[in-house]
């Protein structure tokens, strides 16, 4: 066992020393690190003309973006990853590269800068190579093509990135039984090249195991039907950034995809951006209903309207749709979200600016100016809906920056069968919001930058789960001044983040933020606030408040009190406010200095203005306060200070006296209350008190004492007051205790550790002690010591009782003797 522990320690120390003294090459500028316990040498962008010497255990080597003229010959032969891209290697040697037979990943971008054809079988000895990157060329290669048997021998190759050459003779370059699963043909960088005019039926026929195909920015003008039909395992297809295709190519593509395992289709920017809006037709996508597609991207395609019932033809498996950057307008499709039963994310936002109109851009019958498209658009505009149907599983919806221009005045709603949690509606023109409902599950709402001047409490009806609300960059200043706006956020009790910046707010009502104690971040920057008039004392979870770029000259005592509620840490941003350094603001400045639990963000850069208009940075806060003290001291200030100190002293003394006699005061309170209500002792024919004894015990020890006490009661004709049986229901517990002690001849306290940990047990003992005083010194408190080691934790008043009076000790080993003694003691009382 000792040997194993020593061995483990030695291994750990060796590993630690290896990390602290990590070295991987003869070049000190190379960065050495471990990637999943594999030593990595990062020597890129060092302007190296020769390769450094690498340690034998280095497995990942990055020499890209240097000035090497040949492939290094003396690297460790067991390397797994090599990047020699973007060097000056004019004539790479096949024999040198063949030395590294264990390579799994290789980047050779810009390796053949002066070649018009890549050499055959250059990689044939790299039988373990999995990924080959050679898509970026640093010179013009418009006349280049793939050589015959160019990629022969790469039996393990799964992922390859290439330039898309016009002479795309893949059947000559690759073996028929290749293992390629991922092909990326795209224009890489400014010097990249991808120019494939037509994708024919047999273009990719050589790749029978293809799962992932990217044809990005390849100047494709047409794709034949059947070009992808043979790709049975295809799950990802990206044909974006080919604006010469237009939407008319979609029927050919989607027809083929029904014979594949397609999961993701990305067809962004298939139209040039400057032209007539397009109609997305059912015929474009109808074959997709025979697939298991999960993601569909049709962004930036100038789609203006979606044909009626098109959603019905999309596959039920669809979870993500991106139709952003399209000039969409209203249509019947807004009522047809129910067809997309599993859709979770929908992007319809628009961020790009409109460009110059070009009538010749993809002009064809697919444009929205044809008769059919016009009918649909007119129907959409003339129809007024009050209920919008969202896909039932939709959680994320973005319709930002679409310039939607209408008020929500009439009662409008989202269909109740929705799961929406995130709604991005910023950057529109929804200027009046009064009645809206249906967003029962919404957690995140961005309503910023809408020129909204009116928002009511009814808008948030049902949004009980909302945690993030962004209302910035609107015109809500005047609305929030109204008395009715005081409760506008009352329904949002779970809200954590609220942004009201850039709203021209001059006043916020005192109780506007008392609706929740969960608020954590509050942003009020770039408004016209002059003070913090709103109550934040209930917002104990507040971590950040931004008051920057307002008109605050100082915070008054009320404002400081609102911010002084006990919190773990509060960050306050007050930069770019015209803070003043005057006698009136000195209290505020002192508060800033003393606020150790608050962090004034960049507080050292705040400036304040003296009465003579001079400015000074608050990094010199101590000097400012000292200077103001000398300037502002006066007799009145001294009198006020002395008076305050005197009042504080009296208050502290009063509290000290009240604390010293707190038990007596509490007893007198309940005794007086009992007397006021007309309580009197209940007398039996032969005894003065209602009970022989009040039993005080820890509730956790009930099972140990109560059964025996009940037995004593039955056998000896005793009458005990036991709280679980005899307390009056509906009466305050403290009052029940006081009445029980007052109506009992004695109080028996079973002293144990659990007894001392109970607030009510201690209260019962204190009240019994007060009862003794009330009865002119008569002994009423009878102690039973259950645990013998209580000396250190026993309260002083109980120590006095046990020192002045006899008591019983409870022995758990011989309980019979205790209960006999207990019976005798009760009889003699």
Image (cartoon, rainbow, N blue to C red):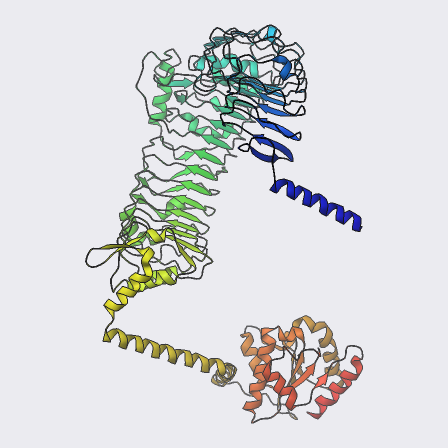
Residue at left 74%, top 82%?
Answer: 712
Residue 639: % across, % down: 27, 77
Relative to the observer, which residue lies in front, 684 or 279? 279
Q: Quadrant of the C terminus?
A: bottom right
- Inspect this view and state whether residue 644 appears: yes
Q: Quadrant of residue 173?
A: top right
Residue 232: % across, % down: 62, 16
In the picture, measured across the screen, residue 245 lies left or right of residue 634, that is right
Q: Quadrant of residue 483?
A: bottom left
Up the image or down, 100 lies above or below 223; here it is below
Residue at left 70%, top 81%?
Answer: 785
Residue 581: % across, % down: 26, 59
- Inspect this view and state whether residue 739 appears: no
The mark tally for this picture is 0
Relative to the observer, which residue lies in front, 351 or 13? 13
Residue 394: % across, % down: 50, 34
Up the image or down, 819 lies above or below 137; here it is below
Up the image or down, 136 lies above or below 345; here it is above
In the picture, measured across the screen, residue 708 lies left or right of residue 300, that is right
Relative to the observer, which residue lies in front, 187 or 208? 187
Please, which residue is most extreme toward the left here?
612
In the picture, measured across the screen, residue 71 lies left or right of residue 142, that is right
């Amino acid at each position: 066992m000792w040997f194993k522990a020593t061995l483990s320690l030695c291994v750990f120390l060796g590993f630690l020393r290896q990390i602290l003294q990590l070295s991987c090459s003869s070049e000190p500028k190379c960065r050495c690190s471990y990637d999943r316990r594999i030593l990595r040498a990062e020597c890129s962008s060092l302007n190296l003309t020769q390769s450094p010497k690498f340690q034998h255990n280095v497995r990942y080597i990055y020499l890209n973006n240097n000035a090497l003229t040949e492939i290094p010959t003396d690297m460790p032969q067991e390397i797994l990853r090599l990047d020699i891209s973007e060097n000056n290697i004019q004539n790479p040697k096949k024999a040198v590269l063949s030395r590294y037979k264990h390579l799994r990943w290789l980047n050779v971008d810009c390796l053949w800068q002066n070649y018009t054809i890549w050499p055959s079988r250059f990689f044939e000895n790299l039988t373990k190579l999995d990924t080959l990157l050679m898509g970026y060329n640093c010179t013009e290669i418009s006349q280049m093509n793939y050589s015959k048997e160019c990629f022969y021998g790469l039996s393990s190759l799964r992922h390859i990135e290439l330039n898309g050459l016009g002479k795309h003779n893949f059947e000559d370059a690759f073996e028929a039984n290749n293992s390629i699963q991922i092909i990326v043909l795209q224009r890489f960088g400014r010097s990249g090249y991808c120019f494939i005019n037509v994708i024919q039926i047999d273009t990719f026929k050589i790749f029978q195991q293809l799962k992932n195909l990217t044809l990005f920015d390849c100047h494709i003008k047409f794709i034949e039907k059947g070009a992808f039909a043979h790709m049975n395992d295809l799950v990802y297809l990206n044909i974006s950034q080919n604006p010469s295709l237009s939407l008319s190519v979609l029927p050919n593509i989607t027809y083929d995809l029904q014979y594949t395992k397609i999961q993701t289709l990305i067809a962004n920017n298939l139209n040039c951006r400057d032209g007539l809006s397009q109609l997305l037709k059912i015929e474009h996508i109808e074959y997709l209903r025979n697939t298991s597609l999960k993601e569909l991207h049709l962004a930036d395609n100038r789609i203006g309207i979606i044909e009626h019932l098109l959603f019905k033809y999309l596959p039920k498996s669809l979870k993500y749709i991106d139709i952003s950057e399209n000039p969409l307008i209203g249509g019947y499709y807004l009522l047809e979200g129910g067809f997309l039963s599993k859709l979770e994310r929908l992007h319809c936002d628009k961020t790009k600016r409109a460009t110059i109109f070009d009538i010749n851009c993809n002009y064809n019958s697919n444009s929205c100016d044809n008769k059919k498209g016009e009918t649909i658009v007119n129907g959409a505009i003339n129809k007024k809906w009050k209920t919008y149907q969202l896909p039932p599983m939709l959680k994320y919806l973005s319709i930002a920056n679409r310039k939607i221009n209408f008020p929500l005045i009439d009662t409008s709603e989202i269909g109740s069968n929705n799961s929406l949690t995130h709604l991005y509606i910023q950057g529109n023109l929804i200027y009046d919001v009064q009645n809206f409902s249906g967003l029962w599950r919404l957690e995140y709402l961005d309503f910023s930058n809408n020129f909204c001047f009116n928002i009511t409490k009814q808008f948030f009806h049902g949004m009980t789960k909302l945690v993030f609300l962004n209302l910035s960059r609107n015109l809500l200043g005047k609305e929030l001044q109204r008395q009715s706006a005081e409760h506008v956020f009352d329904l949002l009790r779970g809200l954590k983040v609220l942004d009201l910046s850039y709203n021209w707010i001059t006043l916020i009502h005192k109780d506007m933020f008392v609706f929740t104690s969960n608020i954590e971040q509050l942003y009020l920057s770039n408004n016209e606030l002059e003070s913090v008039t709103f109550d934040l004392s209930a917002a104990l979870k507040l971590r950040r408040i931004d008051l920057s770029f307002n008109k605050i000259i100082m915070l008054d005592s009320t404002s400081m009190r609102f911010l002084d509620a006990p919190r773990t840490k509060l960050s306050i941003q007050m930069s770019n406010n015209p803070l003043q350094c005057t006698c009136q603001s000195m209290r505020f400045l002192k508060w800033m200095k003393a606020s150790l639990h608050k962090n004034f963000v960049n507080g050292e850069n705040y400036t304040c203005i003296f009465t003579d208009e001079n400015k000074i940075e608050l990094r010199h806060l101590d000097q400012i306060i000292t200077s103001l003290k000398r300037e502002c001291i006066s007799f009145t200030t001294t009198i006020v200070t002395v008076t305050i100190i005197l009042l504080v002293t009296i208050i502290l003394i009063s509290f000290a006296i009240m604390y010293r006699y707190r038990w007596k005061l509490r007893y007198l309170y309940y005794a007086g209350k009992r007397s006021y209500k007309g309580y009197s002792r209940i007398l039996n024919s032969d005894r003065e008190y209602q009970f022989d004894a009040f039993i005080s015990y820890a509730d956790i020890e009930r099972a140990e004492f109560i059964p025996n006490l009940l037995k004593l009661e039955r056998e000896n004709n005793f009458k005990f007051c036991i709280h679980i049986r005899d307390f009056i229901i509906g009466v305050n517990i403290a009052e029940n205790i006081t009445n029980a002690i007052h109506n009992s001849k004695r109080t028996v306290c079973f002293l144990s550790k659990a007894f001392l940990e109970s607030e009510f047990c201690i209260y019962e003992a204190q009240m019994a002690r007060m009862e003794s005083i009330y009865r002119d010194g008569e002994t009423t408190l009878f102690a039973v010591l259950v645990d013998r080691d209580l000396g250190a934790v026993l309260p002083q008043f109980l120590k006095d009782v046990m020192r002045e009076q006899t008591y019983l000790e409870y022995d758990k080993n011989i309980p019979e003797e205790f209960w006999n003694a207990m019976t005798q003691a009760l009889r003699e009382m």
